[in-house]
Image (cartoon, grey):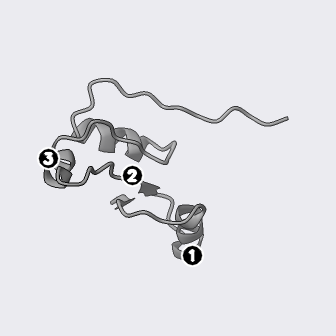
Amino acid sequence: KTAIVIKSTVPVGFTEKIKKQLNYEDIFFSPEFLREGRALFDNLYPSRIVIGSKSEKAKSFLKKYGQREIQMLLPKKMN
């Protein structure tokens, strides 16, 4: 099963909306942090990779990009 990774800037809630429209859970957001004049270098050698997902596919995506340490930061439950 394939995952869909959105690399472009999108509005808040877009990924969840598209998951519902397509009835497909393996869609996640991974923004790029590109500096002016250094975009190619930053793309090839990212200083950080952020994944907007809690899924196992997201962990797999991180591993393929060479992350040595995977840290999942989950929001605390709101009471």
Mark number displayed over residue 12: none
Residue carrying label 1: 21
Residue carrying label 2: 30
Residue carrying label 3: 41
Mark before the other along the chain sequence, 1 or 3: 1
Q: Nearer the viewer, mark 2 or mark 1?
A: 2
Q: Position of residue 51 (x, y in %)?
A: 42, 45
In the drawing, does residue 78 fall left or right of residue 41? right
Mark before the other along the chain sequence, 2 or 1: 1
Q: Position of residue 46 (x, y in %)?
A: 24, 41
Q: Amino acid at mark 2?
A: Ser
Q: Position of residue 39 (x, y in %)?
A: 20, 53
Q: Amino acid at mark 3?
A: Phe
Q: Nearer the viewer, mark 1 or mark 3?
A: 3
Mark before the other along the chain sequence, 2 or 3: 2
How far is the residue under mark 2 from the one under mark 1? 20 Å
Q: Residue at x 53, y 70 (%)?
A: 18
Residue 38's place in the image compared with 76, above or below, is below
Q: What crowding class fits label 3: few (fewer than 14 Cα within 10 Å), some (14-19), or many (20 or more)? A: few
What secondary structure is found at the residue carrying circle 1? Answer: helix
